[in-house]
Amino acid sequence: MKRILIIALLSLSLLLTACSYLSHFSPSVETTAAALNTTAAVTIIPTTAPTTVQTATQAPTTQTASAEPTTITATITTTGATAPVISGANTLTGTFQGYEWGDYLHVSILGDDGTTYDFFVLKYPGVEVETLDIGQKVKVIWQNSDEYLDPPGDNVNLDKVLSIELIG
């Protein structure tokens, strides 16, 4: 029974760590207070299979667990810390127009101002770009920067996506 409880507590700890990690490193730039607190529950259902327990002073004995299921609930409370501000970052809202693979992934966004913007996607932006549908409303956080690209094997000034979030 102790082994089952220890395994359950370790599983709960791992689950809570994962929830904390996801809420802390969420790809979304804006986070709501409701999404910050997470509750996880683990139910321990003991088996009735006999187990052999050996002690240092006695011969092995066989015991049968007969306890009722136990539920352990824990709540992770995190602070509503704001996302880090990235120097030179810009925000664009608009409509996803498509993507294209060359040496790198590029996305095309029709801004709310009627202008089409093209961006390099060098790192995972928080959504799978290839699964977006043309016409979806998106919010893009982007930055103009000098990046080393190979090819062409040189520093290139480009507009790169930092994150993409579905809106509406």
Image (cartoon, rainbow, N blue to C red):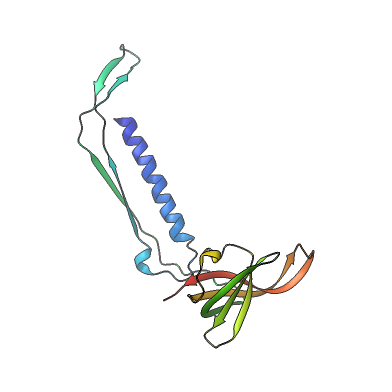
* Residue 149 seen: yes
* Image spot of residue 138 (x, y percent): 49, 75
Q: Position of residue 103 (x, y in %)?
A: 71, 64
For residue 101, side relative to residue 140 (left or right): right
Residue 9 location, quadrant = top left
> How many tags in the picture?
0
Task: For residue 90, say whether it is visible.
Answer: no
- Left or right for 28, reference 106: left
From this view, report whether residue 18 is shown above or below residue 135: above
- Which of the 4 image quarters holds residue 79? bottom left
Instruction: Please tell me which residue is depicted at 31% across the width and 36% down the height of the picture.
Output: 5
User: What is the quadrant of residue 153 in the picture?
Assistant: bottom right
Residue nearest the viewer, comparing 9 with 64: 64
Quadrant placement of the C terminus: bottom left
* 105, 123: nearer the viewer: 105
Tell which residue pokes out farthest to the top in this image: 59
- Taking 84 as reference, is 118 left or right? right
Q: Position of residue 132 (x, y in %)?
A: 51, 68
